[in-house]
Amino acid sequence: MSTLATIFVIGLLISIHEFGHLLAAHAVGIPVERFSIGFGPVIAKRRWRGVEYCLSVIPLGGYVLPRCNDEADFTRIPVGRRVVLWLGGPVANLVAAALALAVLNYLAGGFSWYGQFVEPWGQVARQSAEFIAALGTIIFHPNQLSGIVGIVSAGKTVMAGGVASSLRFVVLLNLNLAVFNLLPIPPLDGGKIFFALLEKIHPRLARLQTPLTLAGLAMLLLLMVYTTVMDVVRQLA
C-alpha cells in the first residue's frame, strides 16, 4: 500500500508543477489549449472554460499546451510572458514545499505566525541551496544518483514512518522538482528560460534551441535509463 501511496504522491507533486504552469499562463494572458496530467494516449478529458483537461495513460508527468498554431506563433509571445509561464511550475513546487514545512513546524512546536508564515520560506531557501551544492558532488559521483525506482523504494520506507516523515519526503521531492527543472538544460524549464533570454540578446541565437533541445532530451533519457539500472542493481544487491 505504501508503494501505491508513494507513486500517488509523486504524481500529485508533478501535477502541482504543471498546475503552476497553467496558473502562470492565465496570469500573463497566454491562452491554453490543453492541460494534461500524464503523457501518452488520453483516457479521460473534459473541456472547461476553453481549456481541455486530460488524464493520460502514463501518470508520472504532464504538460500545458499553449493555444498556438506552430512554434513560430509561440515565439511571437513576448519573452517576459513566456519566462513567467516556465517559472510557474518550479514556483508551485516551492510553494508546496513551504506549505508542507509550515505543517511540520506546527507539528513540532504548535502554531506561531513565524513558524507557519515566515520560517518555511527560510527553510525552503536553505534546503534549496543545500540541494544545489549537492549537485556538484553528484557530477563526480554519479553512482549516488537515483531514479524513479529508487525514489519509490525510499518513499515507501519513509512514508511508513508516519505523517512527519511523509511531509519531509514531500518537501524533498518538491525541492528536487523545482531546482532540477530550473537547470539551464533544454527541454527543462530552466533551459527554455535560458534560450528565451538568448533570443532577447540576439534573435539568431534562437536557432540553437532545436538541436540543443534534442541533445538535452537525449541526455535526460540516458540519465533516466542509467538511474533506473542503478536503482534495480541496488534493489537486487
Image (spheres, rainbow, N blue to C red):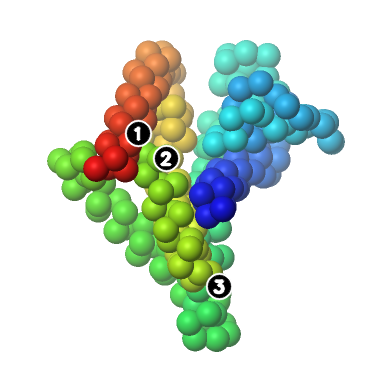
Separation of disc 3 and disc 1 at Cα? 32 Å
Tag 1 residue: 228
Q: Residues within 10 Å of mark 3 (few under 14, many from 20)?
A: some
User: Mark 3 or mark 1: which is in front?
Assistant: 1
Mark 2 falls on what kind of element? helix
Tag shown at residue 148:
2
For image coordinates 55% across by 86% down, the residue present is 110
| Of 204 and 93, the residue lying toward us | 93
Question: Circle 2: is it few (<14), some (14-19), or many (20+) Cα within 10 Å?
Answer: some
Q: Amino acid at mark 2?
A: Ile
Residue 214 placement (x, y as % from top left): 39, 16
Q: Earlier in the sequence, mark 3 or mark 1?
A: 3
Asked whether, in this view, residue 90 is left or right of residue 122, the answer is right
Q: Is residue 141 visible?
A: yes
Q: Amino acid at mark 1?
A: Thr
Precedes in sequence: disc 2 or disc 3: 3
